[in-house]
Image: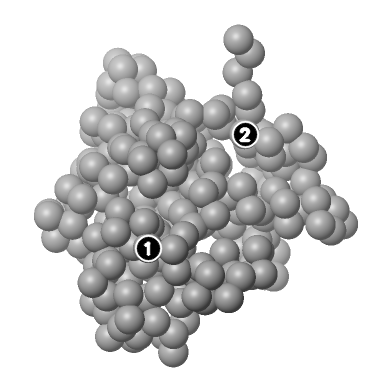
Amino acid sequence: MSVEHLIELIAADVAPGLAREISVNDVSWTVNRGDWWVLAGPPNSGKSALLMTLGILNPAARGELRLFGQAVTQSMGDELTSIRRRIGMLFEDGGHLFDQSTVLENVALPLRYHHNLSLADAVERVMPFLEACGIAAFAAQNTRGVGRANRRRVALARALALQPELLLIDNPVAGLDPSQIRWWRGFLSQLNAGHPVLENRPVTLVLATDDLRPWLPLARQFALVRDRKLQALGGREELESKHGDLLAELLSEEHR
């Protein structure tokens, strides 16, 4: 059976927002269905800009992006919206929540927007995601009053609401306590393997992090973003056998 490429970046330059100053240049990289990639690198190395490009929120400054086998251009119209619906995006620190709205309303927003549902009609679809993320007790609470750790879970539940095939995750456990980190490790592992909330369909993961250590035993593929370059390092065994010195350097840099 042939391998399905979910993401293909071909000689792409990536820039954050409208600044157009290149963060990562000449990226040629492929993500296959079922992969779990971890993009490691220091803060401000371009990891977030790369995720924004993959999520079709910032166009590549140069080169080609292909998602689900289709070349992506900003002139695609409704077809571009259809591709976006297949991608979940979790911004750093649970950002982009609407604090004037409840947890339930935040998570229901993608369903209401894309399927033209009333809030009442969306509730039945939304509650399983709140329960899976352990935040059902906060459903009626405004996100302004929800703690930092649970805000990230709200953002995760919202990213899952459209049942994406690809999930892009930016630094999800930074600053969290060990019990929260354990929850994220376990839940993301279940998503990659196939979680009941997504009808046991495995989700392809691309996770950016300043801290490689929580993900070493779990992720399948690793890459380094540094000095405006993305370097694919391979799987866990290859990372340890062929890049042992680099691995030691990464861990020492991130935790010195």
- Residue drawn at (66%, 69%) of the image: 116
Question: Crowdedness of circle 2 by 10 Å Cα count: few (<14), some, many (20+)?
Answer: some
Q: Nearer the viewer, mark 1 or mark 2?
A: 1
Residue 48 in the image: state x and y as whole percent.
50, 57
Q: Which numbered disc covers residue 105?
A: none
**Nearest to the observer: residue 5 or residue 208:** 5
Q: Which numbered disc covers residue 6?
A: 2
Q: Is there any visible trace of residue 226 in the rendered image? A: no
Residue 137 in the image: state x and y as whole percent.
23, 72
Kindly state the secondary structure of the residue where label 2 is placed: strand
Q: Quadrant of the N terminus?
A: top right
Identify residue type, mark 1. Answer: Met
Q: Residue furthest right?
A: 75
Q: Residue furthest top?
A: 1
**Nearest to the observer: residue 249 or residue 128:** 128
- Residue drawn at (46%, 60%) of the image: 125
Kindly state the secondary structure of the residue where label 1 is placed: helix
Q: Residue furthest bottom?
A: 100
- Residue drawn at (36%, 67%) of the image: 154
- Residue drawn at (54%, 54%) of the image: 162
- The residue tagged 1 is 127
Label located before the other in sequence (1 or 2) = 2
Residue 8 in the image: state x and y as whole percent.
67, 34
Q: Quadrant of residue 248?
A: top left
**Nearest to the observer: residue 135 or residue 250:** 135
Q: Is there any visible trace of residue 121 in the rendered image? A: yes
Residue 198 in the image: state x and y as whole percent.
44, 43
Q: Is residue 251 left or right of residue 193?
A: left
User: How far is mark 1 from mark 2, CA to CA?
Assistant: 29 Å
